[in-house]
Amino acid sequence: MAASWLLSECGLRPLPRIYPHPTTGFASKSSNLFNLRPVPVSKTRNLCPSFKLSYWSKQGNWQLNVAAPVSFTTVNEEEDKESEEANEEGEFFDPGAPPPFKLADIRAAIPKHCWVKNPWRSMSYVVRDVVVVFGLAAIAAYFNNWIVWPLYWFCQGTMFWALFVLGHDCGHGSFSNNPRLNSVVGHLLHSSILVPYHGWRISHRTHHQNHGHVENDESWHPLSEKIFRSLDNVTKTLRFTLPFPMLAYPFYLWSRSPGKKGSHFHPESDLFVPNEKKDVITSTACWTAMAALLLCLNFVMGPLQMLKLYGIPYWIFVMWLDFVTYLHHHGHGDKLPWYRGKEWSYLRGGLTTLDRDYGWINNIHHDIGTHVIHHLFPQIPHYHLIEATEAAKPVLGKYYREPRKSGPLPFHLLGSLIRSMNQDHYVSDTGDVVYYQKDPNLYGGEKTE
């Protein structure tokens, strides 16, 4: 059995093992976790050899090759404090180690009624949101003064984001069991906010099927060091300097992320297989029809009025989308792993996602902050996600990271966003379990030895 090592002032020395108690409710024969005392170091080191874990699940035969932990990096005082609070028992939890449970264990813990889709209930949310959207527009147009407009922009942009989330449920099939209803509602909702429904649905499916994979993930995946170094300064600035990353979504729809090619609008894109071309053409046609409608309204109402009623709320929606989707996969106080090769599995990738609390916005955007269970089981309707998450917590144990409670508005998440943008720049070109690294020269800093 391989030894664990600790990097100290005197060099490398072996560290005695501490075997943790099994997750509440069961013991796993597959558990083989290393508990190390975290020691901040100035440079990344590869410390531990890999080991292999195999188990049989009703969902399939999962084979996992695990390297734990691959690296230690310097942490700031805030992250040290979070780590101390999270490890009151003095044990080091390695998030890159394989979990001592299977996907089937999580599924079994979730009540059966959480899987039931109620199309009437789903449609009630659509009706609610559409009524609010038109009501806000009518109120703003009626008063038409500069005291009302900023409040309207924030509220309407947030409601556009809520419409997106309902269309997102249609894309997952969690809206109803009727594919035709899902498609019709999804097209109406997403086209109204200039999102190509099928193009997005297919790429988002790729994101869920490959979550946590360095190369194969589709949404906000890390850049390898080679790709990062190849970017020009303008591209680096746009990707890592706020507010530019929060305005990225429309450009992503047209050209995807650095290192990937294709468009969500083009049926010949690398994103799609041949039998999906008709769906992509349909969605692109619906998007074009909405764009034409907006152009006509510009002539009828005037470009300034359309900018105030639709244009600015649209960009608020884009910022909500980029803000939420980024923080569901980045910004935790402790570095979380990304995988490639044989180390990746659907379960391990899904466990690197994060739940977030958005205060008053939780209900408005349909509890999209309950993201871990959604990523593992996207078929669960949004109105059951909170209950499903509570039921799964005893199984997930430390692999579930309790979100920080929010005030009425999630201003606390701005700090997580800024910290992540400053520190999470690229991952190593090699290794199957990797962590984000920082480029000290990105913002003009001096090189560190």
Image (cartoon, grey):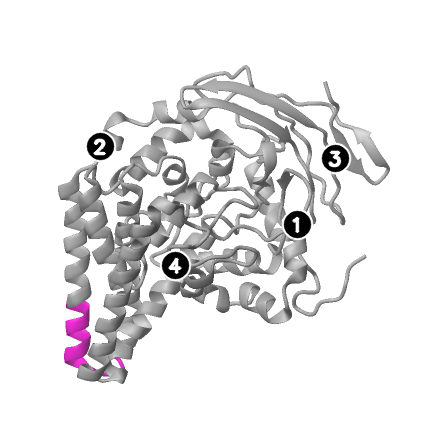
Q: CA distance from mark 2 to mark 1?
A: 44 Å
> Relative to residue 444, is residue 110 drawn left or right?
left
Tell me the magenta residue range: 135-148
**Residue at image mark 2:** 116
Q: Callout 3 environment at 10 Å: few (<14), some (14 to 19), or many (20+)? A: some
Could you give the CA–CA distance between mark 4 and mark 2, rounded to whole angstroms?
35 Å
Q: Would you name the residue on which mark 3 appears?
A: 47
Q: Where is residue 38 drawn, in percent x and y? A: 68, 38
Q: Nearer the viewer, mark 3 or mark 1?
A: 3
**SS class of the residue under badge 2?**
loop
Q: Give the residue at x 19% y 64%.
A: 133
Looking at the image, which is closer to me, 341 or 445?
341
Estimate the spatial distance between the alpha carbons at disc 4 and disc 3, rounded to whole Å.
45 Å
The residue that mark 1 highlights is 75
Nearest to N terminus: mark 2 or mark 1: 1
Q: Which part of the image, by quadrant, shows the C terminus?
A: bottom right
> Which disc, if any, is residue 266?
4
Q: In the image as oriented, which residue stretches furthest toward the right? A: 10
Is 140 contained in the magenta span? Answer: yes
Which kind of residue does numbered mark 4 sit on? His
In front of the other: 39 or 73: 73
> Compared with residue 216, is residue 345 higher up or lower down, i.e. above or below?
above
